[in-house]
Image (tube, coloured by chain):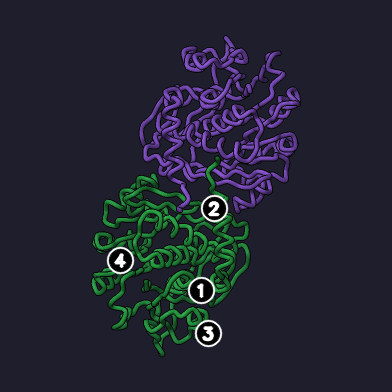
Chain colours: A green, B purple
Amino acid sequence: MHLTVFGSVGLDDVETPAGRVESAVGGSAVYFSLAASLFTDVRVAANVGHDFPDAAWDVLRGRGVDLSGLQVFADRPNFRWKGRYRGDMNEAETLDTQLNVLAEPPRIPEHYLDARFLFLANSAPETQLMLRERMPDAVCWADTMNLWIDTARPALEALLGRLDGLVLNDGEARALSGEHNLVAAGERLREMGPRVVVVKKGEHGAFLFAPEGRFSLPAYPTTRVVDPTGAGDSFAGGLLGSLAASGGHQDFAALRRAMVDGTVCASLTVEHFSTEGLERADPAELARRTAELRSFVEWPA
Amino acid sequence: MHLTVFGSVGLDDVETPAGRVESAVGGSAVYFSLAASLFTDVRVAANVGHDFPDAAWDVLRGRGVDLSGLQVFADRPNFRWKGRYRGDMNEAETLDTQLNVLAEPPRIPEHYLDARFLFLANSAPETQLMLRERMPDAVCWADTMNLWIDTARPALEALLGRLDGLVLNDGEARALSGEHNLVAAGERLREMGPRVVVVKKGEHGAFLFAPEGRFSLPAYPTTRVVDPTGAGDSFAGGLLGSLAASGGHQDFAALRRAMVDGTVCASLTVEHFSTEGLERADPAELARRTAELRSFVEWPA
């Protein structure tokens, strides 16, 4: 099944204890698509500035990703983000954000309107709601961030009522639900609309809350965290790509397999700057990491 | 196999978002023994003040715990701790500590000297090392805390070289190993001496690092966290009690089962103030929680 994603394309300046990069390829739509395209056919839509390198799309082109939803602005610079991670690298410190082309509304190609499986990466909830209403028959998942929880809660709550699934991090889950306890937060968020909620916890892994039950999975046990930028979008890409590849049924087993695929994709991203890990990934590497993750959580006989 | 524990007996004033208690029964030796005695025979040693209520030992007496190592000071008050938890309750804020009888050296009853399985709860590393040297043939595990990492590192490093197992929390693991990444921290700590290292992560569960591999387990998914005081000692009690019950072999399967038992014991403690959860626990409740924890982490078919 096709998976359609609306998100951002970024040029990132990132500093971590492992080093730094400037104008590195990033953005939610890029990380998401690179991860999802390891599992299923992907259509991507995003606003792109004149200074974003065309060669950055080569890997996605090679994987047959539909790039016709990219709206390139010949006269506007790309979205830029500058950030820094310290210590345990669980949280980014944003130093600068230049929205540029992100301030423009997204374009929806005509042939995207029949989307059956849709992911709305973090953006203003009003925009996410508009996109969702244009594709009302799609199974729809979304991400969000603290900015919108603080400044656009009514629109975000309206969006929640129109979602099948929500992916967000632990701090966002606490803020949006009003519950400090993450298990209580996940259950409360399901009451706010989405049938399925996934709470990302960075190095601590992720929780799944579904009608059939809950599932906990740790992060892949890497000792080589170079740059966490894009890990959450890579997780979402693996998760949704896996679900779409399962036909979008979203039964509990498919959801748990999708958690595994998302976790493996996030681990590929954090071990390199920018998108290098996801670009180099192949099925053998996915299988190797899946087996190691499985042994990491194997219930004792 | 008998399990011998040296630790503290406490009277705690605790405030959490769920309420408050004053002069509540606590201390590492008490929580540890209540948990461990659900699995194996326990001998406890600790210094006790004149104001500690004798009735607090009734449950341990009922479980056949050997209390002959309790050294009661008729003229000295008990160790007291006053603390507060806020928000996600992952960290205690200490408001006051009165060592009182804890400032005195522990007493080792003659018949404890043949200990085969020994747990040294957090105390000054010099004291832990002295106890270990008096029981050199025991399989010996220990806990520690940031205070000693900061102020007594040489003694702590000497202790590490004499341990079979180390249990500590995530912040302590990072500080003691010098590694921010918890997987790297666990592996580094094993290089510093103990064959097995367990890193407790509060609501995020625990990691096991052993020669045969690594194991990750989440916390039991409770939505009712009343008071985290003693959760770490309860975890250690369940862990070591389970290992002792397995004959102390410490193979990888036994270690993972012990992680499960420790996790279940910690969940019993956090759902009540003081020791109520562990006092009320019975085999049926342990089995129910073990089954729920298993379904929480079940790898998808």
Measure the C-alpha gap from mark 3 to mark 4: 32 Å
Tag 1: amino acid: Asp
- Tag of residue B223: none
State the quadrant of the N terminus of chain A: bottom left
Foreground pick, B61 / A2:
A2
Foreground pick, A117 / B268:
A117
Tag 3: amino acid: Ala
Q: Are marks 1 and 3 in contact (CB under 8 Å)?
A: no
Q: Earlier in the sequence, mark 1 or mark 3?
A: 1
Measure the C-alpha gap from mark 4 to mark 2: 29 Å
Regarding mark 3 in the picture, which secondary structure is present there?
helix
User: How many tags in the picture?
Assistant: 4
Do badges 3 and 4 share one subunit?
A: yes
- Horizontal side of residue A241 vs B9, given as left or right: left
Using the image, name the chain to which the residue with label 1 belongs: A
Q: Earlier in the sequence, mark 4 or mark 1?
A: 1
Q: Earlier in the sequence, mark 4 or mark 2?
A: 4
- Horizontal side of residue A247 vs B159, given as left or right: left
Regarding mark 2 in the picture, which secondary structure is present there?
helix
User: From where the camera sits, is residue A88 visible?
Assistant: no
Q: Name the outermost residue toward the front.
A: B301
- Tag of residue A12: 1
Regarding mark 4 in the picture, which secondary structure is present there?
strand
Tag 2: amino acid: Arg
Q: Nearer the viewer, mark 3 or mark 4?
A: 4
